[in-house]
Amino acid sequence: MGLQEPLLIGRDDSDDVLEKRRISSDLRFALKTYSPVIYKSASPCTSSMLKSIVLGSNHMNHVICQLSDEWGEPAETFRKKATMILEEMADNLHLSAIRLLAFILSKVFKRVFRRIRVNTEGIERLKKALSDNPVVLLPNHRSYMDFLILSFVFYTYDLNIPVIAARGLLEIKILSTILRRSGAFYIRREIGTNKLYWAVLSEYVKTMLRMGYAPIEFYVEGARSRSFKSLLPKLGLLNIVTDAFLKKEVADVTLVPISITYERPVDETLHAHDLLGLPKIKESMWALFKARKILGQDFGTSSIHLGEPVSLKALVQGDVNLSQYNLDHRYCNLPSQEIKAFLHHTGCRMIHLQEENMVISPFVLVATILMQKLICSISLHRNIVKIDNGKTMLVQEQQADSSTDKHLMQYAVTVLTCSMYRNQILHIFVRPALAAMALSFTNKTQKEEIFICYSFLQDLFSSEFVFLPGNAKQDFEEACHRLSEWGAVQISKQNIELTETGPLVIFFILSIFQPSSFLIFRYHNDGHSFLLMFWLILYLIIVWLLIKEKETIKGPESSRLISSKNRTLIKRRVK
Amino acid sequence: MPDDSTNCFVYIFTFLNRQDLLKWNGWGYSDSKFIFNKKGQAEFTGKRYRLSGMVLPALREWFEKTFGASLEHKTPPRSALNTSDIPAPILNEDFLDDLKATKIPFSHEIEDRIFRAHGHCLHEIFALREGKFERVPDMVVWPSKYPNNKSILSFGVKYFIFTLTGGTSVSSALECPPDEKRSIVSLDTSQMLNVSGYCTGHEPDSMEFSTLGGWVATRASGMKKNIYGNIEDLVVHIRMVTPRGVIEKSCQGPRMSTGPDVHHFIMGSEGTLGVVTEVTIKIRPVPEYQKYGSVEVAKQRCAPASIRLMDNAQFQFGHALKPQVASIFTSFLDGLKKFYITKFKGFDPNQLCVATLLFEGDREKVLQHEKQVYDIAAKFGGLAAGEDNGQRGYMLTFVIAYLRDLGMDFYVIGESFETSVPWDRVLDLCRNVKERIVRECKERGVQFPPLSTCRVTQTYDAGACVYFYFAFNYRGIADPIHVYEQIESAAREEILANGGSLSHHHGVGKLRKRWLQEAISDVGIGMLKSVKQYVDPNNIFGNRNLL
């Protein structure tokens, strides 16, 4: 079986970044003249200048005075605290670090990836956007690699290296220093609760926007999506950026949604482990060192799609009443209900734009079908799928380990990894599936009735999938249109009726959403169960716990995921 | 306000031949204008101004560089009025007979009517140069004194009356509603203030050509308001004739607590309620000592009579208006100064901005103030840049309208607009609005980079008045006025979004009417409407300004 290179269903005008790297010297690449396009009204500014501007700003002074009044402590203590927070937070962008990283990454990427594809028109668009306005980059977050790969691409194409909001990693001193020097800034979880922290962070981000210091990159989803399904947007940083615009500290901000897709993510199994509730491997130098084994593997192609830049000003138009800002206090940071709704809407829209340009690799389709117990073959994913006697099956046991425990884990990992791949396609099917659900639930043909059920379902799943708020009617229309395209239904003005082939199509779509046809089907044999990821996980863990409990009565390590209350519940059930 | 001011009556008297003295299709006096002479150098003609008769060697280069304009591409105005272009007057014979009986002078000559058909908005001047008119007043009347005025109004119930507020309006306030079928009568109430040894202290940029009634009707502001105050601070007593009758206060007390001040219904009413026939304002002795000054790069808080902060583009503009120097010595001295500032002090001429100052009062006070200001300037790294720079900065405001006429001869159109904004938003507003203008120009197909510049012209405790100049070269655009209006309206949106006001002193007129509701709330509009409804139910003052 020859190693056939899977083709990506991507756009044709993409460029392979690694192609040039393979034929020319990495050292020369690292030392090349790097002259990025910068924001046209940027004022030249080093990171230390930036820090002193932040600390000297009116906003900081205002908050510090307020806090010292509140706590009855001298302003100086708060000023010191603010300085410390900023020291820990701020980036320390240096071209030398970027060059070093470019050199290392070039070596690494060439080993692990076959290609890194970037859409060329996206680069041109971004170049223009970067000179016109302060830019905020919004990539999806599927892997630790995301920001590295993006900065690497930016360096290659002479785009201004972004500063990147990062969480964690502070424990690894060396790594965090390197990353800090290549543009990372660090956010702690206190972001929402600590007033001073919030003030420093928002002033820091706003100052960068104002000065045109560098493009700012953060993940709207807030965290890596382990299930590969888009997460609901987190609004903290988006709020700061929007606030800077609404208070007119910048004339406009350009948002650029970026879709990064991996044919095989580097941290594929890590995700499954995380989902199973295995203790998260602590981010340490040692863990990083151990992870070097990935260097020997093949992760296929990763593709980056730089989306159409979106003007924040255009988004705000009509959605937000700007005149309220003329009367509010300038440093009042509490977003109104209207703003919150706007932010959520914008976040969802950005995620949709990311999803739209996600590349769907063949294996995603295969996995979708594999999850429905159909047979196909592929060699890249031999750790998940194996070919046995001409049949393809999911890998169940890699080592002859007799322990049921290991066995089950291995199986769970496989299933989860597979469903992870499948999840990459869910955003295409979710609306038609809900419509189909509604159709079979109501058992009626009136459009109105079906829509009522549909919007109920969409509401029910609104924290599971990303839906644009207030867009149900349109989503429904689109879903029905899709269904009729697939020959499942016939739509007339008032009615929606199943065609002859309808039940078959609908069965197919719905079964995509069954987490695993192997495991849970027997317990929910109504055939329409919409069991979601976490149900599966819970199920797996319960089974695992049951086994574990029988063998040794030792505290399970998965306490991260299951609260003690749940555990007693399980124990009771065991008894 | 200091107490040493005295009151004086200002009477309105007729000024029959304004158009003989002033241009009919441009700004100001007929004899004063910028031209390019045979050598291709810019020159200001006439004898009325300090700049008159001088050659301005740097202006041409600045003009060509800033706008991408060229002296080869000309767009001269029509030289004379074509009578067939003017719509025939709608006259009412009864009214004419009545007028003749009262012996009030009137005219329906084309020139008189055209002269009073417009303010100085760009589109109005542009239309004049092209010789296009939609609706002009049908008749001009010079009501000389108050009693006569009242009688005219009594005719107005049957017809229709339209007021003229001096003719320097930049809010389309004088534009006649094109669909008005009634006879439009323009009242010319231009007057002159002429009491020797005294001044009002009120000096708007259009001072020579605007009227006291106009100042009152639009809530005008003068540049020396820091000493003398704005029009609302200067006015002691107003008498206005309305269709309902005469409105005035019964005495001239300096302040009254008699409910909401009725003067404030009049000030800013923009000719929608009646004719202001008599205004009593404070006057003061002409100041003993006057001194200009300027500071380069400064940030300060101390109030000379006037202080203005210009951005770099305007600083360069000001420099383009430097007259030719007569002696080699002065030019050597200028070179030395420039060398000191740029090389020794390290100021970049492309970054530099300048604050112009005007001190007024008795000599001692002026010198003391001056020292204070320069001390503050020095503290913030500013540099006293001399009287000359200061004076030139103020000159710019008096000649800018003449300069626009020059620009219009060479495909360059422009306009100024203003706003007021709290201090903490001044910088953001200036930056964003200028940026928005440049961007809008690009998006709307303007081929050359525009001039988009601003200055802070008035300072208050709670904020400042910001004045924008915006001009561009319209070669290659089919409908420049439409493009211009779109950009100006985008700029106004930007101003409002940045916490700026709809207007600081230009007024609303018809140009900014659509934003008024947002600016003063629904109830506010309702209050104004009910006043109008009571005072002028038949809409005799139907210029449709404001509401």
Image (cartoon, coloured by chain):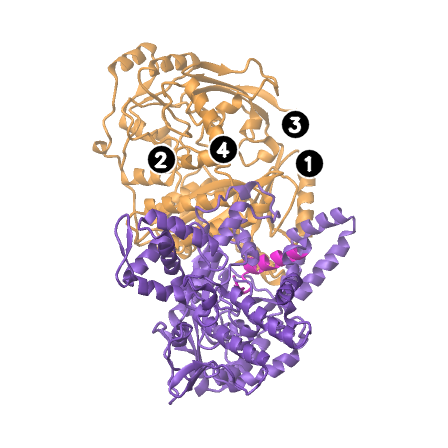
To the question of a shared chain for discs 4 and 1, the answer is yes
Q: Which residue is mark 1?
A: B365
Residue A242 appears left or right of A564: left
Q: State the image quarter where residue B94 is shown.
A: top left
Q: Which residues are magenta?
A: A197-220
Q: Measure how far apart labels 3 and 4 are at the Cα level.
A: 32 Å
Question: At 29% across and 26% down in the image, what residue appears?
Answer: B180
Q: Dot 2: what SS?
A: loop
Subunit of label 2: B
Subunit of label 1: B
Q: Which residue is mark 4?
A: B520
Q: Earlier in the sequence, mark 3 or mark 4?
A: 3
Name the outermost residue toward the right. Answer: A73
Q: Earlier in the sequence, mark 1 or mark 2?
A: 2
Question: Split into 4 quadrants, where in the image is the N terminus of chain B?
Answer: top right
Q: Which residue is mark 2?
A: B23
The amino acid beneath tag 4 is Ile
To the question of a shared chain for discs 3 and 1, the answer is yes
Question: At 52% across and 33% down in the image, what residue appears?
Answer: B221
Q: Nearer the viewer, residue A258 or B355?
A: A258
State which chain is coloured purple: A
Q: Nearer the viewer, residue B107 or B535?
A: B535
